[in-house]
Image: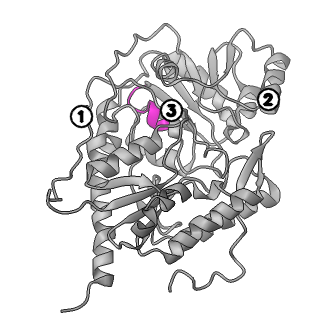
Amino acid sequence: MGKIAGLSGYFPTCIPASPDVSAPSPPTGAVPMTQASEEVPRTADARTADKPRPTVMMCPFTNPTNRYIQIQKDLYRSIGYDVVPLSIKGLLNGGFFQLFKPENILAFHWLEYRPFKRDKGTARLNLTGSLLFAFYCSLMLIGRAKAVYFIHDHAVHDTIGFNRRLSVRIIALVRRLADFRVVHAPDFQAQYNAQYLPHPLYWDAPGQAPITPRKYGATPQYSLLGVIRPYKQIDALLDVWPDECKLRIAGHGTEAYLATLNAIIDRRSLRNVVQLDARFLTDAEFAQSITDSDVLILPHAADSMLVSGAFFEAIGRVPLLISRATPFMVWAARKFDNVILFNDISELPAIVQSVNASWPAIARNAGNLAIDEFGWNACRRRYEQFFEAVEGHRNAVEKPVV
């Protein structure tokens, strides 16, 4: 049992609140050119109709605040897999036997969040969640289905001190238990012994209606969208934000962090230029917010998440993105000429003032390039190749030599 070796002294007792990604459920808009069909194909070309479809058992199976999970399920179905919940209820309803079919796959997203519970803006270890985490880890150990772990974060959001260090170790543990690892940031393949797969564009997924981009105004509208949380370092951004540039911050936030941001806005007399819209945005509202944005700001700390979900909402739709120089955004800036980077937050005012001075000549449309890299058809090809490799590994290991 190769999965068990080396775990002594390493297994923590381990559901969180829903895993937190940068943006709420994705918008319903899309640039006019899109690759996604209106309906997800139910059968991949490579799989014949008379052959049983293998199954992806997925955890979590739903996420009401972010459509990423739904898009993943649609992708798996489009390349020839049935998709079912990997949950206690699902296992009791007949899913347990699916664990022992070697052609099946266990797909885990944000499993490291299970042992933690968020309280007053901080995530702390939780007994109930820890037990459920241990249960899911045991499924990887006993099942014959291949376990695929999608690594989204370096550490659990909003953890500090001991809890943060523990979350890093928990991620390392799950990496060791999984048969395969996936990252959405190419530069982390070696560090995490993982395969790069593109993060799908939200706006190019099936069922997304085209939108008409708005005309540029005389001055750019800056936006910071998605959950309002400390790991985005919005407080540091407001400390240096130019008082002549309009900024809209929109998304759900914790009471304590919102109080911090409001105090900075009042201290710096930014009420006339900074709009803090602290509430959960519906899909339609988020889509409209993206459409109304000329420049999206991504100030996320580099030591938390591998990629920002908001990037995949905006790239190809928002004319400019200004981001902290995280490894993924450095990679993205080499591909897209509408991504501007800063290393330190103190550089942001000069960048924003330069954009204002160059507007609208500096605006860019990266829609076609975004589709080529992260669009629905591009993702289908890459995911199908990866899942075929997972199956090929299974066949090479488990088929008898004849």
For the residue carrying disc 3, how many other residues have a C-alpha within 10 Å: few (<14), some (14-19), or many (20+)? many
Q: Quadrant of residue 148?
A: bottom left
107 lies left or right of 170:
left
Spatial distance from mark 3 to mark 2, Cα to Cα? 22 Å
Q: Position of residue 221 (x, y in %)?
A: 54, 16
Instruction: Please state if 370 lies on the left or on the right of 281 as rendered.
Output: left
Disc 2 crowd, CA 10 A, few/some/many (<14, 14-19, 20+): few
- Per the rendered image, the range of residues in magenta is 311-317
- Who is closer to the viewer here, 179 or 339? 179
How far apart are the two marked residues, 1 and 3, measured between alpha carbons?
Answer: 20 Å
Residue 385 magenta-drawn?
Answer: no
Q: Position of residue 320 (x, y in %)?
A: 47, 27
Q: Is residue 383 above or below residue 396?
A: above
- Residue wearing tag 3: 25
Is residue 256 found left or right of 282 in the rendered image? right
Residue named by callout 1: 37
Give the crowd class for mark 1: few <14, some 14-19, many >=20 residues within 10 Å: some
For the residues bearing labels 3 and 2, Cβ distance under 8 angstroms: no
Residue furthest to the bottom: 402
**Looking at this rendering, what residue extends furthest in the front direction?**
93
Residue at 63% from the left image edge and 49% from the top image edge? 302
Q: Which mark is residue 372?
A: none
**On screen, 63 above or below 82?**
above
Residue 188 seen by the camera: no
Q: Residue at x 32, y 54 (%)?
A: 82
Give the residue at mark 2.
255
Q: From what the image shows, is residue 222 above or below residue 161?
A: above
Q: Are marks 1 and 3 in contact (CB under 8 Å)?
A: no
Q: At x 27% / y 48%, what residue is drawn?
A: 78
Question: What amino acid type should be assigned to the residue bearing mark 3?
Answer: Ser
Amino acid under disc 1: Ser
Q: How is the image coloured?
A: one colour
